[in-house]
Image: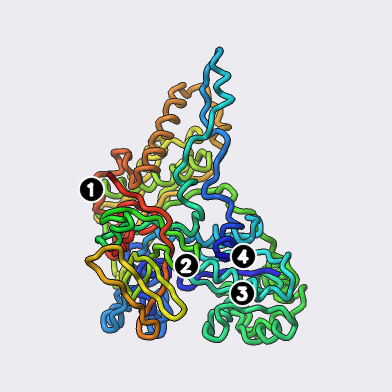
């Protein structure tokens, strides 16, 4: 059996864990730059706050109902996520049976639990996670990952009745669940495929599961479609993924806090993002051979902040792969000049490091000096200082001192669980 | 108590160590024998944090627990995985507030008892108030 453990309104739950005054009260969390609503508590949902809508659009109802609003506090969510996952790994006693699927979801391999104990075991997992971390979770249990996802969706749909746990183990339970689920609510079925399926008259997951495999192969993207059909029929076809393989590329992208018109500010932002990406690069002991930069301008006729503007990008191939921040910054900032147009307003920039190779394997070429070793020690020192002191205590001058372009996070809560100076006060 | 033992049972320590973190004397001559006696040293995380995913730090504001050696500005270590039994110092939530008090539980009554003469004990009215136990205080860090 497979289980998925999914945190309920995860970001809101993290915020509320340290705020008992907000328990059972409506709460929403905003995306980067306070743009859209990315998490809402059940209470906020019941008041009619829609998901993923722009903040300003939800503003009237938020103000009228006195809903608490938070900017994203990724330090807090990252730490709470680790706590939830670590609790699951501890309970399972075997880290390889827990696959962290996203910040707030994990698959678990429950193959070793006897069928008659699954319900108690699920309840035990739920209670322990809540007791240890303060985060409430929903659990779906079924023969395959796709069905576990489906079970979880049903558990969340009617929390009162399900107690946030739904098991689909018998044939009857599975059939009913598949009949109740529309194809566009299935995990792994993209919007384009869902529209296609519905046009063909296949609306429920049950109907889809009865289609022949050959049909899925022809009409649903080959092996991916076959896998989906098999998963729906209860034949495990998606295995547990290995945890965190080294990334093939590393990207850092952020919205600006306000429109930027000055090329120097764009360069500062790009240098800052490169510093962050290079840090991640060194953490996995890689070096990058290619640096890409993109910037996004505001549309001339824009009405709203969130409309997509034109993206322009360019990349540079480095003479040799590097993990040194200053070499990467030099290449990236050089690209900005070719992209930036005077007189335009920019709202977003991003960088990407790719063509990654293992750092240890970099053979110095004939033209590289032995100063490279010293540079590497310098990077090591900078990473250590920034890791222990936080907030980019040491940074390159090109990333700027004032950072007027920095992300808006006006309503961020303290970093209760990761910072000594932000600890929750108790009376 | 059984619950406490149960939670402790599966947990395998608070920190992962790797071999190279253990220092060596790095002596080339005679002194190399000292390498045989090198230890990892004391790690406060390991000593004070029994169950890392369930452990939080909080700052005390006020004088409610001075009699227990917990003063204004101190940092307390709170373990959510330990069961709150009568007599333990806990973090309680009461009507939206977080309080540090000694937990007193009898058959039909819960009391939150401060350790200062300046405050009185709170009788928790379980039907008329929102009460829960947030975690159990395991250590206090006090700066001298």
Q: Position of residue A186 (x, y in %)?
A: 60, 76
- Residue matched to label 4: A107
Q: Position of residue A399 (x, y in %)?
A: 31, 43
The CA distance from mark 2 to mark 3 is 33 Å
Q: Examine the rendering and report whether any part of residue A307 can be seen.
A: no
Circle 4 residues within 10 Å: few <14, some 14–19, many ≥20: many
Q: Chain of mark 2?
A: B
The CA distance from mark 1 to mark 4 is 43 Å
- Residue matched to label 3: A140
Q: Residue at x 48, y 33 (%)?
A: A319
| On-image quarter of the N terminus of chain A | bottom right
Q: Position of residue A394 (x, y in %)?
A: 32, 39
Picture layout, residue B51 above or below residue A283: below
Q: Are marks 3 and 4 in contact (CB under 8 Å)?
A: no
In the rendered structure, find residue B85 and report the number of the disc placed on it. Answer: 2
Q: Secondary structure at mark 2?
A: loop
The CA distance from mark 4 to mark 2 is 34 Å
Left or right: B29, with B88 as reference point: right
- Residue matched to label 1: A402
The CA distance from mark 2 to mark 1 is 52 Å
Q: Nearer the viewer, mark 2 or mark 3?
A: 2
Could you tell which of marks 1 and 4 lies nearer the N-terminus?
Answer: 4
Could you tell which of marks 1 and 3 lies nearer the N-terminus?
Answer: 3
The CA distance from mark 3 to mark 4 is 10 Å
Circle 1 residues within 10 Å: few <14, some 14–19, many ≥20: few
């Amino acid at each position: 059996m497979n289980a998925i453990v999914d945190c309920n309104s995860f970001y809101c739950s993290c915020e509320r864990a340290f705020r008992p005054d907000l328990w059972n009260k409506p709460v929403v969390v905003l995306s980067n730059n306070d743009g859209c609503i990315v998490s809402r508590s059940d209470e906020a949902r019941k008041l009619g706050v829609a998901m993923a809508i722009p903040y300003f659009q939800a503003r009237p109802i938020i103000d009228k109902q006195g809903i608490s609003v938070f900017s994203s506090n990724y330090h807090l969510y990252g730490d709470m996520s680790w706590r939830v996952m670590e609790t699951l790994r501890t309970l399972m006693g075997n880290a390889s049976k827990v696959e962290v699927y996203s910040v707030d979801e994990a698959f678990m391999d429950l193959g070793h639990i006897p069928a008659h104990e699954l319900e108690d075991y699920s309840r035990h997992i739920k209670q322990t996670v809540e007791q240890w971390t303060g985060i409430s979770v929903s659990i779906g249990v079924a023969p395959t990952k796709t069905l576990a996802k489906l079970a979880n969706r049903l558990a969340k749909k009617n929390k009162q009745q399900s107690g946030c746990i739904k098991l689909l183990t018998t044939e009857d339970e599975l059939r009913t669940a598949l009949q109740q689920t529309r194809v566009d609510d299935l995990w792994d079925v993209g919007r384009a495929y869902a529209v296609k399926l519905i046009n063909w008259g296949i609306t429920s997951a049950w109907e889809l599961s009865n289609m022949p495999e050959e049909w899925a192969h022809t009409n649903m993207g080959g092996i991916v479609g076959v896998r989906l059909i098999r998963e729906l029929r209860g034949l495990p076809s998606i295995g547990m993924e290995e945890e965190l393989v080294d990334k093939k590329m590393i990207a850092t992208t952020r919205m600006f806090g306000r429109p930027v018109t000055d090329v120097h500010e764009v360069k500062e932002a790009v240098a800052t993002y490169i510093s962050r990406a290079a840090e991640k690069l060194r953490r996995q002991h890689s070096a990058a051979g290619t640096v890409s930069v993109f910037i996004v301008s505001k549309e001339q006729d824009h009405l709203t902040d969130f409309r997509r503007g034109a993206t322009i990008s360019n990349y540079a191939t480095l003479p040799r792969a590097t993990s040194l921040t200053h070499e990467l910054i030099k290449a990236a900032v050089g690209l900005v000049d070719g992209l930036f147009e005077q007189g335009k307003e920019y709202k977003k920039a991003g960088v990407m490091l790719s063509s990654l190779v293992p750092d240890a394997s970099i053979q110095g070429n004939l033209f590289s000096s032995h100063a490279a070793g010293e540079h590497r020690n310098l990077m090591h020192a900078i990473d250590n200082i920034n890791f222990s002191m936080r907030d980019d205590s040491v940074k390159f001058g090109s990333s700027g001192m004032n950072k007027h372009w920095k992300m808006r996070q006006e309503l961020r809560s303290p970093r209760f669980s990761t910072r000594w100076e932000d600890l929750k006060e108790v009376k | 108590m059984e619950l406490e033992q149960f939670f402790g049972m599966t947990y395998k320590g608070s920190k992962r160590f790797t071999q190279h973190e253990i220092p060596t004397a790095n002596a080339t001559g005679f002194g190399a024998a000292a390498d045989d006696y090198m230890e990892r040293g004391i790690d406060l995380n390991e000593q004070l944090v029994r169950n890392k995913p369930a452990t939080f730090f909080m700052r005390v504001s006020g004088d409610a627990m001075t009699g227990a050696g917990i003063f204004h500005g101190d940092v307390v270590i709170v373990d959510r995985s330990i069961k709150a039994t009568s007599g333990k110092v806990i973090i309680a939530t009461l009507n939206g507030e977080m309080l540090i008090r000694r937990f007193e539980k009898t058959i039909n009554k819960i009391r939150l008892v401060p350790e200062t003469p300046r405050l009185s004990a709170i009788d928790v009215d379980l039907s008329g108030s929102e009460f829960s136990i947030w975690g159990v205080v395991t250590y206090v860090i006090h700066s001298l």
